[in-house]
Image (cartoon, rainbow, N blue to C red):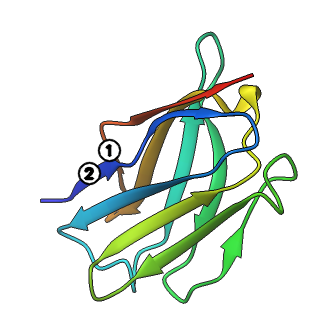
Amino acid sequence: QVQLVESGGGLVQAGGSLRLSCQASGIQISINGMNWYRQAPGNQRELVAAITGGGTTNYPDFVKGRFTISGDNVKNTVYLQMHSLKPEDTAVYYCHTSHRWSDYWGQGTQVTVSS
């Protein structure tokens, strides 16, 4: 059974930093690709970072240079380090993976950036 549990969200001032964690079980992040998405009220869920099992990363332009995704294969945990946060980064952040043709999501963690 695949489970993803996020943690690390919170309230931060603009320009600040946060690190989100996603503890995975039922899969090996060294094999599965892992993603971070976010969803703000009234908006569609959007991809903010992706990492393959081999460690290749990908980011959309609006977070490139500010967000970094990484994984700890021993802890089976994926991280999202966020710097230079902006009010528009405010959203619920979700960890995601696909395994055996099914999508799995964490419960989400709220990130709020105040101006």
Relative to the observer, which residue lies in front, 85 or 49?
A: 85
Going 47% across and 65% down the picture, which residue do you hit?
79
User: What's the amino acid at mark 1?
Assistant: Gly
**Residue visible at 39% across and 84% down?**
31
Amino acid type at circle 2 is Val
Locate residue 98 relative to residue 46 in the image: left or right: left
Please give the name of the residue rendered at 26% of the width and 51% of the height, measured from the top-left corner: 5
For the C terminus, the quadrant is top right
The secondary element bearing badge 1 is classed as loop
Rendered image quadrant of residue 91: top right
**Depth check, front residue: 113 or 51:** 113
On the rendered structure, is 6 left or right of 9? left
The reply to whether discs 1 and 2 touch (Cβ–Cβ < 8 Å) is: yes
- Tell me the quadrant of the picture where the N terminus can be found: bottom left
Q: Is residue 18 above or below residue 54?
A: above
Q: Note whether 97 is above or below 74 in the view shown.
A: above
Q: Which residue is mark 1?
A: 106
Q: Which mark is residue 5?
A: 2
